[in-house]
């Protein structure tokens, strides 16, 4: 039987292969929302991931953006976003990923974020550090906003857009650069790798940030959650651990 991490890696790579094969092809749309798109490929990729993980660990369960499977009170719970950055994917922007995390009795113990277009595999195990393609990574040491590059996510409700917009206007004048990339999981992987220094978003879901949360902490950074992570939406501020004044 593969290890938990090996199983998550295999599932993420399998999902990534499907995404590469179908990138910039005619895509089936399950639902076209005002601020989001649900693709049939999202569902297919989550089904592939779930089948692989549950075949290896049949007593575990899956909590995913495209639905849940198994007994959610199981000791092992996989938290899956099959395509984080679906709008990017649909528009042919090659910035998206698969994110898989594992909770054991409520504690996140490992995570995998795979960018199939760059073939970059970010992995983390609790107590074992964070890695990119097998090499240890660490957050940046930048400690002032004036030298920081941050990413700000804009969520879908009118209130979150208002609050996020006000924060963006305040921070844009203080930081070196801002970026809006369209994938929360990759934003967090980039913080862990020292490419970005912070990420803030008003409303986000657990499957978007679960793997990246542990990744940033194991790479030396800090993640602040405002709200209940078991609620549908909550707020997040993730940093390299040196920056203040973002909230």
Image (cartoon, helix red, strand yellow):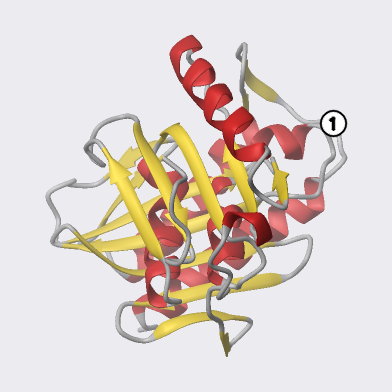
Asked whether, in this view, residue 233 is left or right of residue 91, the answer is: left
Asked whether, in this view, residue 23 is left or right of residue 158, the answer is: right
| Up-down relation of residue 51 to residue 25 (above or below) | below
| Up-down relation of residue 41 to residue 192 (above or below) | above
Give the position of the N terminus as an image quadrant: bottom left
The quadrant in which residue 111 appears is bottom left
Residue 152 location in percent, x, y? Answer: 59, 39
Residue 113 location in percent, x, y? Answer: 55, 63
Q: Residue at x 52, y 16 (%)?
A: 162
Q: Is residue 98 visible?
A: no
Q: Residue at x 67, y 67 (%)?
A: 195
The quadrant in which residue 196 appears is bottom right
Viewer-closest of 108 and 71: 108
Give the position of the C terminus as an image quadrant: top left
Residue 174 location in percent, x, y? Answer: 63, 45
Q: For numbered disc 1, what is the local secondary structure?
A: loop
């Amino acid at each position: 039987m593969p290890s938990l991490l090996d199983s998550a890696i295999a599932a993420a790579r399998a999902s990534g292969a499907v995404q590469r094969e179908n990138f910039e092809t005619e895509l089936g749309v399950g639902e076209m929302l005002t601020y989001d798109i649900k693709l049939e490929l999202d569902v297919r990729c989550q089904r592939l991931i779930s089948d692989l993980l549950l075949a290896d660990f049949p007593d575990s369960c899956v909590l995913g953006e495209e639905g849940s499977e198994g007994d959610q009170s199981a000791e092992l719970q996989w938290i899956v976003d099959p395509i984080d950055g679906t709008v990017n994917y649909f528009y042919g922007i090659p910035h998206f990923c698969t994110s898989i995390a594992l909770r054991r009795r409520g504690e996140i113990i490992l995570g995998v974020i795979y960018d199939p277009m760059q073939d970059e595999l970010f992995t983390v195990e609790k107590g074992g550090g964070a890695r990119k393609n097998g090499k240890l990574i660490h957050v940046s040491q930048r400690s002032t906003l004036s030298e920081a590059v941050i990413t700000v996510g804009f969520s879908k409700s009118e209130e979150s857009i208002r609050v996020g917009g006000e924060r963006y206007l305040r921070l844009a004048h203080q930081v070196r650069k801002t970026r809006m990339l369209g994938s929360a999981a990759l934003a967090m992987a980039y913080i862990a790798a020292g490419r970005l220094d912070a990420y803030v978003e008003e409303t986000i879901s657990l499957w978007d940030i679960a793997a990246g949360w542990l990744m940033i902490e194991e790479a030396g950074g800090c993640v602040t959650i405002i709200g209940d992570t078991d609620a549908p939406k909550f707020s997040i501020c993730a940093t390299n651990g040196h920056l203040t004044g973002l909230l």
